[in-house]
């Protein structure tokens, strides 16, 4: 009996630790998207609500330039940027990387995509996508932590869930992709379909 209780406590503790490692989705379809004002990596002011006066916004959080899944997703967005814009969308990418690293990524993608360095995690926290990279959130966490330290310049090891929010001109979230598995990214066809 004591063995069963000890095993139950061990399993419960493990599950609670794992469950608490990733944020729970806060914003859903139909919610009003929270606004923010910041600068993009070119130094231009970006005000979400002002941007929404002109177009819908596809707000995407990505982990960093060191992440091959992020790079692949950015390339897919670049390849389909005209179709996304034709559907009325403006793509905005947010990452915790320092501006110098973000500028490098921007050089290899479309000029029509807005890149934002969220090195202080204000936008990530606002959208509740922030998590700490640790042994509970990644099997390769030791190597990834070195990459995060290099590109963010920090040792807090905070990253975003690679979430996507399609936000309408009325400031309402029309579609969300929120999956903690960093290998799963929003599908371009789903983005375009939910912009129309």
Image (cartoon, rainbow, N blue to C red):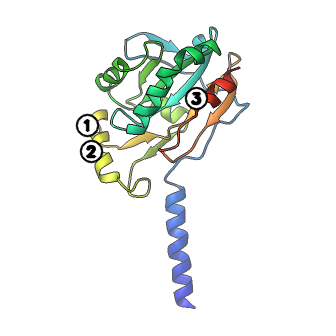
Q: Seen from this angle, which residue lies furthest right?
A: 30
Q: Measure the C-alpha gap from mark 2 to mark 3.
A: 30 Å
Q: Which residue is mark 2?
A: 146
Q: Counting other residues with Cα less than 10 Å from the Cα at mark 2, is it few (<14), some (14-19), or many (20 or more)?
A: few
Q: Which residue is mark 1?
A: 150
Task: Determine if residue 61 is in view.
Answer: yes
Judge left or right: residue 87 versus residue 4. right
Q: Residue at x 54, y 65 (%)?
A: 15
x then y, percent, for residue 135: 38, 57
x then y, percent, for residue 85: 59, 14
Q: Counting other residues with Cα less than 10 Å from the Cα at mark 3, is it few (<14), some (14-19), or many (20 or more)?
A: some
Q: Secondary structure at mark 3?
A: helix
Q: Are marks 2 and 1 in contact (CB under 8 Å)?
A: yes
Q: Residue at x 68, y 36 (%)?
A: 28
* Residue 12 vertical placement versus 52 (above, below): below
Q: Which residue is mark 3?
A: 188
| Front residue of this view, candidates 28 and 190 | 190
Judge left or right: residue 12 versus residue 107. right
Task: Determine if residue 153 is in view.
Answer: no
Q: Secondary structure at mark 2?
A: helix
Q: Measure the C-alpha gap from mark 2 to mark 1.
A: 6 Å
């Amino acid at each position: 009996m004591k063995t069963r209780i000890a095993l139950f406590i061990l399993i419960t503790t493990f599950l609670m630790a794992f469950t608490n490692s990733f944020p729970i989705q806060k914003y859903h379809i139909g919610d009003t998207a929270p606004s923010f004002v910041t600068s993009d990596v070119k130094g231009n002011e970006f005000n979400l609500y002002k941007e929404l006066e002109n177009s819908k916004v596809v707000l995407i959080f990505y982990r960093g330039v060191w992440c091959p899944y992020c790079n692949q997703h950015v390339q897919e967005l670049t390849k389909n940027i005209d179709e996304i814009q034709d559907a009325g969308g403006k793509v905005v990418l947010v990452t915790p990387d320092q501006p110098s690293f973000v500028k490098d990524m921007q050089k290899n993608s479309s000029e029509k995509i807005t890149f934002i360095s969220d090195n202080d995690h204000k936008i990530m926290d606002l959208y509740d996508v922030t998590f700490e990279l640790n042994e509970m959130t990644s099997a390769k966490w030791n190597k990834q932590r070195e990459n995060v330290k290099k590109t963010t310049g920090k040792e807090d090891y905070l990253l975003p869930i690679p979430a996507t929010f399609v936000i309408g001109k009325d400031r309402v979230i029309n579609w969300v992709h929120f999956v903690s598995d960093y290998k799963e990214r929003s599908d371009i066809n789903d983005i375009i379909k939910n912009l129309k």
